[in-house]
Image: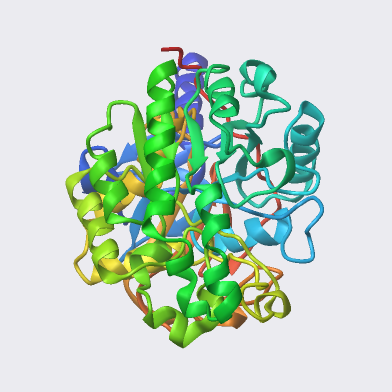
Amino acid sequence: MKQAFRKIQSLADELHADLLVLGGVVITPNGAEQIDIASSGGVIVALGDLKGRWQADQVINAQGLHVLPGVIDSQVHFREPGLSHKEDIESGSRGAVLGGVTGFFEMPNTDPLTLWDADLQAKLDAADAKAWCDYAFYIGGSAVNAEQLDRLENLPGCAGVKVFMGSSFGDLLADDDAVLRNILSHGHRRMAVHAEDEALLKARKQIVEESGDVCQHHEWRNVESAFKATRRIVALAAESGRRLHVLHVSTADEMRFLARHKRRVTVEVTPHHLSMVAPDCYEMLGSLAQMNPPVRELEHQEALWEGIQNGTVDVIGSDHAPHTLEEKLRPYPQSPSGMTGVQTLLPLMLNHLHEGRLTLQRLVDLTSAGPARIFGIEGKGRIALGYDADLTLVDLNAQRIIDNEWIASRSGWTPYHGKKITGWPIHTVVRGQIVVRDEVLVGELQGKAMEFIEVID
């Protein structure tokens, strides 16, 4: 009798979870399935018809909702340290989870730059105390640290190496072929690159210095400035056999070119390049629409959407890069480039889904499975047994209006203020912990550093 009781008790223990998500349409590797999810210890432990069979400390009623793998934003600038009047890790990650994002990769152009072990560790320590969701940080690839990148890129919490061929400063600018070759030859992880040709940008800046007209932003930073840099870095990477990730691709020329180099090159596009068109955005928003690389004409946006449809595009990243309104309203071109984006990434893409521009399965691939696959993130990117219980629950029919008051960023504004959206994040779960319930921040700060699978070519 005692043995039988122990067996029953053991079975009961196995059917108790930390969290149950019941009644939703779950996007799994099989497609859309009407199933329940149980998580314990931060990982998914059961999928299927669990109602009445499992008990849990917390339950989410997901009836009428779609449950997506947690969204990963693989390009944000959270400005800490050194520029935290614009943003910091707490406010940036708070905006992330309110927007349905469960993990982020942060960029190295802070003050100090993220170039060495101590720089990375300082960010990891800050995130351990402040992040609402999981995180990793890029090391900047530079002339000063190139020969140490084999070691630096494998530090815990490192998302990889990020190189700025243009639009940067000091030791982070890497616009010389010899420097780029040295960076490419040290390390084996996929290298992320901002591809704009610095020499061409400098030569053309007089266009806007003379006019002071933000409507010429995309003419100063023209198609050739992006396409020339992209061609250069792809050719240089081919010499060393290094895998590349080309960030915020903005031109039809680049998209057609990169489609022919997909064996080693992955491609990111951003919601603002998919959602805004020049010159209309500059006429309506002025410098609030100012980004690098710039928002371009309709023909380029259409090519980005074609890249999504034909599989050339691997990832959607926000390139969240906030500045204060005071800074953005300086006379152009003294106004800095950048806008908020981490909180609006998913709502904008859900609205595009509603308007028929992509499928839900493709959206999941671009925002969850894609980042996990190409960067080798352990335990993320899909809803499957043994994976982290990172879940983004959305209402595909909810209608909302994006408003500056909703934006958590310290900068306090969005270029999409007043935009009506169909499709909205309702609950956000990070490793089995509810951090946003019914669109309201709950729970506690509990982000952890992501881990990466070591892949050697």
Q: Is residue 383 visible?
A: no
Q: Give coordinates of residue 314: x percent, y percent.
A: 33, 42
Total marks drawn?
Answer: 0
Q: Quadrant of the C terminus?
A: top left
Q: Give coordinates of residue 71: x percent, y percent.
A: 45, 50
Q: Is residue 352 visible?
A: yes
Q: Give coordinates of residue 207: x percent, y percent.
A: 52, 71
Whether 399 is drawn above or below 217: the answer is: below
Residue visible at 34% across and 26% down in the picture:
264
Whether 113 is drawn above or below 354: the answer is: above
Q: Give coordinates of residue 428: x percent, y percent.
A: 51, 56
Residue 11: image quadrant is top left
Residue visible at 61% across and 42% down in the picture:
135
Which of 451 and 84 lies nearest the eye of the viewer?
A: 84
Residue visible at 70% across and 73% down in the picture:
324
Which of 380 and 410 lies nearest the eye of the viewer?
A: 410
Residue 258: image quadrant is top left
> Does 2 sit left or right of 28 as displayed?
right
Which of 454 and 143 lies nearest the eye of the viewer?
A: 143
Residue visible at 71% across and 75% down in the picture:
327
> Does 398 sit left or right of 452 as displayed?
left
Coloring basis for residues: rainbow
